[in-house]
C-alpha cells in the first residue's frame, strides 16, 4: 500500500500562481516601447539604430520570459487544484473509516483488562 505521508502548502501554490499571473498581466499592460526613448527624442540616427536594436532584443527576451511565466502560473494553479482534490478525496476516505469504526462494538475488547494500572 502506498504511503501518502507528505504535506503540501496549497495556499503558497495558489499565491505563487496568482503572483505569476499578475506579472504577466503587468507585462501585457505595458510594452517595452513605453520604457525607451522615441526616435524623435534621440535625434541621432546611429544612436536610434542602437536603441531600436536593443528594444527589439529586449522585447523578444521579455516576451519569451512572459510566455514561460504564464506557463508556470498555469502549472502552479493546476498542481494546487490536484493537491486540493487529493486532500478532499483523502478526507472522504478517512471519514468513511471513522464512520465505520464508530459503529464497531468495543466493549468486548477491554473485557478482563485492568485499564487502571
Image: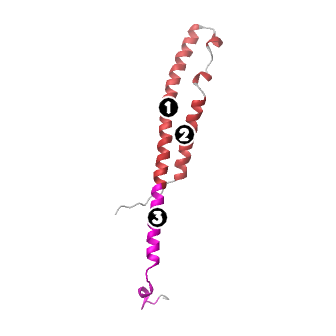
What is the number of the mark on residue 20? Answer: 2
Quote the CA–CA distance across marks 3 and 2: 32 Å
Q: Secondary structure at mark 1?
A: helix
Task: Return the residue nearer the eye: 73 or 47.
Answer: 73
Q: How is the image coloured?
A: secondary structure
Earlier in the chain: of badge 2 and badge 1, it is: 2
In this view, which residue lies farthest toward the right?
A: 41
Does 18 sit above or below residue 92? Answer: above
Earlier in the chain: of badge 3 and badge 2, it is: 2
Name the mark nearer the viewer: 1 or 3.
3
Circle 1 is placed at which residue position? 65
Q: Which residues are magenta?
A: 85-114
Whole-percent x, y for residue 66 in the image = 51, 32
Q: Report the magenta stretch's main SS.
A: helix
Toward which corner of the image does residue 44 lie, by quadrant? top right
On whether residue 93 falls in the magenta region, the answer is: yes
Earlier in the chain: of badge 1 and badge 3, it is: 1
Q: Residue at x 44, y 69 (%)?
A: 96
Whole-percent x, y for residue 108 in the image = 42, 87
Circle 3 is placed at which residue position? 92
Q: Residue at x 59, y 21 (%)?
A: 33
Q: Residue at x 49, y 26 (%)?
A: 61
Whole-percent x, y for residue 82 in the image = 45, 51
Amino acid at each position: 500500500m502506498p504511503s501518502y505521508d507528505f504535506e503540501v502548502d496549497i495556499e503558497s501554490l495558489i499565491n505563487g500562481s496568482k503572483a505569476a499571473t499578475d506579472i504577466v498581466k503587468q507585462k501585457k499592460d505595458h510594452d517595452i516601447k513605453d520604457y525607451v526613448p522615441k526616435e524623435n527624442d534621440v535625434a541621432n540616427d546611429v544612436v536610434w539604430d542602437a536603441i531600436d536594436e536593443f528594444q527589439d532584443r529586449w522585447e523578444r527576451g521579455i516576451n519569451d520570459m512572459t510566455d514561460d511565466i504564464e506557463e508556470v502560473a498555469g502549472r502552479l494553479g493546476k498542481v494546487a487544484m490536484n493537491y486540493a482534490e487529493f486532500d478532499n478525496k483523502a478526507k472522504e476516505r478517512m471519514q468513511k473509516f471513522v464512520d465505520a469504526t464508530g459503529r464497531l462494538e468495543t466493549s468486548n475488547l477491554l473485557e478482563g483488562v485492568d485499564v487502571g494500572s
